[in-house]
Image: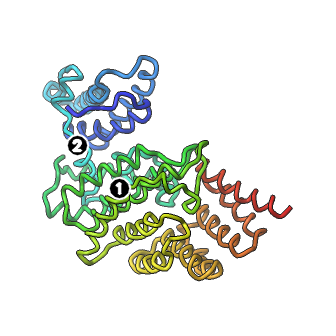
Amino acid sequence: MTSVPPDLPVESLLRELAPQVLGAAVRRFRDFAACEDAVQEALIAAAAQWPRDGVPQNPRGWLIQVAVRRMADHLRSEVARRGREEAVAAETPSAVAPELLEDAVFDPQDTLVLLFLCCHPALSPASAIALTLRAVGGLTTAEIASAFLVPTATMAQRIARAKQSIKASRLPFRMPDGEERARRLCSVLHVLYLIFNEGYTASAGPDLHRGDLSDEAIRLTRAVHELSPQDGEVAGLLALMLLTDARRAARTGPSGELIPLDEQDRTLWDRDAIAEGVTLVSAALRKGSAGEYQVQAAIAAVHDEASRAEETDWPQVLALYGLLMRMSDSPMVALNHAIAAAMVHGPEAGLELLRPLDGDDRLRGHHRLDAVRAHLLERAGDRRAAVVLYRAAAEKTTSAPERNYLAMRAARLIEGDR
C-alpha cells in the first residue's frame, strides 16, 4: 500500500491526495464530472473535520470512502429519476473499512492515468490543460485563468465543457497504448509545465513558492519519462524543472522576500539536481531536433553553471532565446529575449524589443511587462520612469512577495534620488 506522509499540514495533504482519490473514483464509476463533485465534497468534509478531530490513520482511504458514499447517493438519485430502482443494489458499493477500501480501489498509477485521460483527443489542447490543472494539479479556477491570461469566468466555462466532453467520450479509465499516448503527450507536457510554473512562482498568495505543486509536477514528469525514455522533449521538460527548482532555496530570504537571480547565494543551489538536469538535457540535445523544453532547459543550464552572476554567458543565452523565439510566439519568451538582449547589447536594445509587446492582448493588465520595462529603464538611467512602472507592476500582481519586491525597487530608487 502506498504510504502517505503523516506530518503534512492538512491543506497540503488534501492537495496531494485529491488527484489520487479522484483517479480511484473515476476508475470505479466512469463519470468524471460526478466523481469530481463527490471528491470535492469529501475534501470539504475533511477540511472541516480533520483540523478538529485529527487526521485519520488512513487519510486516503477516508477520502475514498466518503467520495464513494457521495457517488452512491448520486447514483440512487439518478436511478430513482429514471425509474430503475432495482439497479441501486448493483451500482451501490457496500460499506467497507477504509483500509480495505484503499487496497481494493487505489492504484499508484491512478494519478498518471488521470493525467492522460484529461488530455484525450475529445478536448481541445487548451481545455485539456485547464481540466488537468484542476483535476491533477489541484489549482483553483482563478489560478488556472491567471496561467492562461484569461478571465476566471471564461476558464470556469472551459473546464465545465471539458468535464462534459470527458463524460460523453466514455473512454475507459486506463493508460492509453503507445500510439494514443504519443498523440496526447504534447498536452500532457504542457500541463506539467504549467503546474510546475505555478508551484515555482505562485500566481497569488503570501508565498513565492508552492512546493507541493512543483514537487508533484517533477514527480509526474519523472513518471512520464519512465513511460517514454527516448522522447527528447520529455527529458527536456524534466531537465528544465530540475535545473529551475535547484535554485528554490536561494530565491527567498528569511522573511520569504523574493531574491532575484543575480543576487542569489549560489552555494544554496541544489548541485545534485543541477547535475541531473544537465545530464538529461545534454543527452537529449545530442539526439538532434531540439524542441522548446530542451532549449529552455539549455538556457537554465547556462545560468546554473555560472558560479557567479557576472560569469553568465549572456551571448549564449541570447542565442538560445533567439532559437526559442522561432519555435514559440509566447509573450513571456519575448520578454525574456528582451532581457537577454539588454544584457548583451545594452538596455536600449531590450526596450526596443519590448515595444511590439504593448499591443499583445495576452499581456494586457499583466504585471510582468511593466516590471521588465521598469528594470530596463532603471539600467538605462531613467529612474523616474522606472519608479512609475515598478509601482504599476506592484499594483497588478496578486503575489505578495512579487508585490513587495517591486514596491521595494521603487522605494530604493526614490530614496536614491533624495
Residue 188 horizontal/vertical position (percent) = 30, 58
Query: What distance separates the C-alpha of mark 1 from that of mark 2?
Result: 16 Å
**Helix, strand or loop under label 1:** helix
Residue 158 visible in the shown view = no
Q: Amino acid at mark 1?
A: Leu
Residue 107 horizontal/vertical position (percent) = 19, 38
- The residue shown at (39%, 59%) is 243
Q: Which residue is mark 1?
A: 192
Q: Which residue is mark 2?
A: 110
Q: Answer few, some or many: residues within 10 Å of disc 2's Cα (few below 14, many 20 plus, some between 14 and 19).
A: many
Q: Amino acid at mark 2?
A: Asp
Residue 263 horizontal/vertical position (percent) = 59, 59
- The answer to whether residue 3 is left or right of residue 202 is left
- The residue shown at (32%, 49%) is 163
Seen from the viewer's position, the closer of residues 170 and 324 is 324
Farthest residue in the top direction? 53
Seen from the viewer's position, the closer of residues 130 and 357 is 357
Which quadrant of the figure has residue 276?
bottom left
Q: Answer few, some or many: residues within 10 Å of disc 1's Cα (few below 14, many 20 plus, some between 14 and 19).
A: many
**Helix, strand or loop under label 2:** helix
